[in-house]
Amino acid sequence: MSGIPVWAQLIYLLAAVCFILALKGLSSPRHARRGNAVGAVGAVVACVVVFFYGHLHHVPAILVAIAVGTAVGFVGARRVQMTQMPQLVALFNGVGGGAAALVALLELADLLDSSGDSSGAHVAKFTLAATTFTILVGSVSFAGSLVTFAKLQELMTSRPVVFRGLPVAFALSLVAAVVLAVLVVTQPALYLGAILAVVGLLLGVLLVLPVGGADVPIVISLLNAFTGLTVAAGGYVLDNTLLLVAGTLVGASGTFLTKLMASAMGRSVVNILFGALRGGSTLGAGVASDRPVRSAGPEDVAILLAYAHRVIVVPGYGLAVAQAQHTLRELVDLLGERGIKVDYAIHPVAGRMPGHMNVLLAEAQVPYEQLREMDDINPEFKQTDVVLVVGANDVVNPAAKTTPGAPIYGMPILHADEAQQVVFMKRSMRPGFAGIENQLLFDPRTTLLFGDAKDSLGKILSAVKAL
């Protein structure tokens, strides 16, 4: 960064500190809003300061692009529903990877022009390697993120897409990517970089197609780490330390988060990515069962809750879909006023992204003290009178403990099956996101309440008030 004045470098250092503090703040729901704001301030400052020292070309076009991007981002963020937040994250991540790949392609052209030799013989090999890495991994992240978006948005099936010859196609694409990457470094040419980008796009699609069900959020986290690494490599190519720091933070945190989520699912990242090729990853039937179950009305559930001493609520994606978090909080507050101890059991992968349930319930102003993590609350299920499962399924499915060969076998779950009574609030008997049947639904201690979660919780709330 020798061409950057000292005052600008100091501001970049301050922005980097903001990014670090932002990550620290995001580690807790209590400080997440503040951490997000600190990170946003650091990003804005980093973008603005370059206008005061850089010798920029096409400034009007840059300002127009910033204005359009700001408008689209602001409107999109304001309108997106909480249930669609994972899709938004996937899109943002894909845009970041795609932007990094495009910048790297442009930088490759500049490197060849500035060297005065079309063969690139005078360009530092490490710089070429970093550029090549950014093009390839950024393209993989862009295409893969678009596929995860399509799966979560149900523009395509969320189940694994496997076809004959997929392993061969993936292997050939990977080999082609490696060969092209070596050629770009040893015999640099812009057309080779462009072909490498296309192969990277194909590789990203083939990487994510076999992933399905509950594994999609983990792949989003992995692709986020990929994008971070491309930004870090791009920072080296552009001689920008701030990009290097920011990309490294995203890459490291995304990798760590991917490992934690995979551990929470009881599986390895390799199994999540390639398990479907052996028929062993999130391959559920996805068909509603016609086996008999015990069902009840809102009044019966209200009696169970009102006369309990200990209640645990297990929220899931269905709660987010119904936008029922505010009604649920009112019910929990009412039970608390009557001396009933109530907590929320939060599984690490509840919903469709890490922290999804925490954010959803924080939006309804649920006290942080009532949000209990899985390892903390699991020992208390045996002393619980009623477990109220609202829109969750896979995270309480005993098949994870009892059925070897099941897609979720080995995944740590919430021990709802150990409680005295379980109330399941579901729209239908359709299986959860992993696409397999939940044996807990047929347990003699389980009662099902069918219907929209918000409507059903409203009726339960009214019935409890009437008791």
Image (cartoon, rainbow, N blue to C red):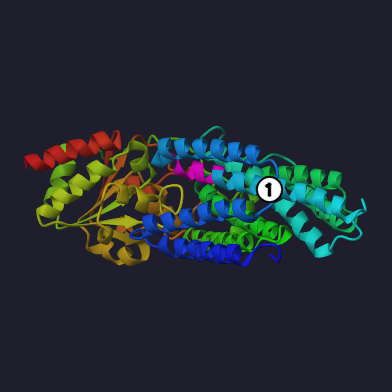
State the extent of the magenta-drawn residues as a range.
Answer: 84-91
Q: Is residue 103 left or right of residue 154?
A: right
Q: Position of residue 164 (x, y in %)?
A: 72, 40
Q: Is residue 388 left or right of residue 171?
A: left
> Closest to the observer: 109 or 227?
109
* Helix, strand or loop: magenta stretch: helix
Residue kind at label 1, given as amino acid type? Leu
Q: Is residue 380 left or right of residue 147?
A: left
Q: Is residue 292 left or right of residue 310?
A: right
Q: Quadrant of residue 465?
A: top left
> Closest to the observer: 256 or 459?
256
At label 1, counting other C-alpha atoms closer than 10 Å, the crowd grade (few under 14, some 14-19, many 20 or more) is few
Number of callouts: 1
Q: Position of residue 411 (x, y in %)?
A: 47, 58
Label 1: which residue?
56
Q: Position of residue 223 (x, y in %)?
A: 60, 52
Q: In the picture, which quadrant includes the C terminus?
A: top left
In the structure shown, which secondary structural element does the residue marked by tag 1 occupy?
A: loop
Q: Position of residue 127 (x, y in %)?
A: 79, 61
Q: Residue at x 57, y 48 (%)?
A: 93
Is 88 in the magenta? yes
Q: Residue at x 45, y 47 (%)?
A: 352
Q: In the picture, which quadrant includes the N terminus?
A: bottom right
Q: Residue furthest left?
A: 467
> Closest to the observer: 75 or 253?
75
The answer to whether residue 356 is above or below residue 65 is below
Question: From this viewpoint, is residue 160 visible?
Answer: no
Is 391 in the magenta? no
